[in-house]
Image (cartoon, rainbow, N blue to C red):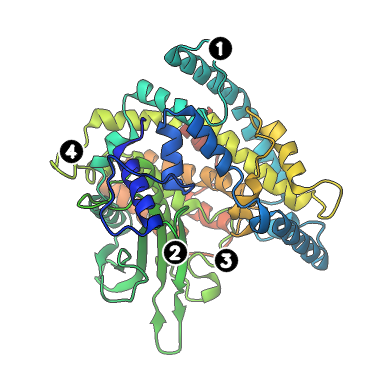
Amino acid sequence: DGLPPTLLAQAAAAHARSVGAGAMPDAANGPWRITLDGPIFLPFMEHSRRRDLRERLYRAFITRASHGDLDNQPVIERILSARHEQARLLGKSSHAEVSLAAKMAPGIIAVERLLGELRAAALPKARSELEELTAFARAQSGDPALDLQLWDQLFWAERMREKRYAYTDEELRPYFPFARVLDGLFALANRLFGVRVRAADGEAPVWDPSVRFFRIADERGVDIAAFYLDPFSRPGNKAGGAWMNNAIDRKRTVDSLRAPVAYLVCNQTPPVGETPSLMTFREVETLFHEFGHGLQHMLTTVEHVEAAGINNVEWDAVELPSQFMENWCFHWPTIRAMASHWQTGAALPQDLFDKVRAARTYRAATMTLRQVYQSTLDLELHHRYQPGGGAGVMDVQRKIAAGNTILSPLPEDRFLCSFSHIFAGGYAAGYYSYKWAEVLSADAFSAFEEAGLDDDAVVARTGRRFRDTVLALGGSQHPLEVFRAFRGREPSTRPLLKQIGLL
């Protein structure tokens, strides 16, 4: 009840795969399998009118990887213990000190100051947002005593967003067919950075039929880089998250220059039957985000592997180009050029896009507080927590949650067991870098706004300066020097605070 057709199609396909059915699944009548994979879990929580099923799914989601032989808690303790031992061997008091020694942030105090400023700005507004959401849910449900639980927030937030801005994710999907979005993204890269992207499918082996291969040429038409694009969710071996990795690094050899190659991996909605991949607006943002990472790897001019592309870029600055590219998703001429109905060809109505742009700061304080919570928890585990001591990692999680959440997590919450960013990824004592980089990216985009977004020549000049600094220099210089070279000054927090509605 309430689930959109795209989600029903994915859930029916998930069931068909689970039982090995060869026939086309019946999206309208099921049966359906609701999984914990992001492309199914999140839309279900946003749209299902069955509160009991939302609760059941939510409780399963927050206890992932925390039972029996698949319990990650002992693994987390071993990881933290090993990192603590390494820090001592390196003469540091904590892994956080080791981590920040190679980052843009000058130290732990500076990071905690940033998180403190964001927390102070977000907490009172997040409380107001919850009060507003509760009042809305009570009015719409007819239950004046309704108390929102953790499995209710996404559902009612989506309803309030629909009512306030009068559009839904499903309403936008038909205007963002994957192929058109790609064309628009590549046109933007040409406009900003003077490079051309062309399809080169068949020129390199791929690991799945849905994987694409592209080459990038410079203004002279000379190929300078290439990338794989693995766009769709594949339950069973790829069903969550998005990332970029370097396949081949740029390198100068005795008699040649090796061109860089990148992997761009997303988990967007796959095609179903005769219907192409129709992207949510968030999936469009994700694609732009990962392409930004790829551009830094592919447009580097550094010829030493150790500092070429994304290599050796301080971790809290590595999100600058990716988050910078996301800003263009809210630029009407950019979106207008790529958004058209996959069946009728009709352009995306501007009034609908204006609502999307207005919704950008919707519940911004709540989302900011969530990132502050996760960043603070990461720093606490890697700076003050003593592995093997009296308290366990879940005790730390509960303590940090108490000061950084509006609705307390459930007692059985085992979020840490699936917090792969800081245990299986590269964000240990560095999860704050998302917010740190947002300061840089918002300020970088403001350079284009100040220069004039409607002047193609000015945009091209500013884009070329961004390419020659942020994208070209990679890890060859400190990111603060790189940023100064582009912006002409040190970064300011004002553009970000203005962007997310906290100023």
**Disc 1 or 3, which lies upstream in sequence?**
1
The numbered mark at residue 347 is: 4
| Depth check, front residue: 189 or 401 | 401
Q: Which residue is mark 2?
A: 472
Local SS, label 2: loop
Q: Which of marks 3 and 4 precedes in the sequence?
A: 3
Q: Could you say where residue 388 lies in the image, as x and y percent from the top left?
A: 84, 55
Quadrant in the rendering for residue 148: top right
Amino acid type of the residue that numbered disc 3 sits on in the rendered structure: Asn
- Which one is closest to the eye, mark 1 or mark 3? 1
Q: Amino acid at mark 2?
A: Ala
| Badge 4: residue crowd in 10 Å (few <14, some 14–19, many ≥20) | some
Question: Is disc 1 in contact with disc 3, using a CB cutoff of under 8 Å?
Answer: no
Residue drawn at the location 66% of the way across and 61% of the way down = 102
* Circle nearer the N terminus (4, 1): 1
**Which of the two marks, 4 or 1, is nearer to us in this view?**
1
Q: To which residue does mark 1 refer?
A: 145
> Which element type, helix, strand or loop, lies under badge 1?
loop
Give the label, 4 or 2, closer to the camera.
4
Residue 491 % position (x, y)? 55, 45
Residue plotted at (69% across, 36% down):
411
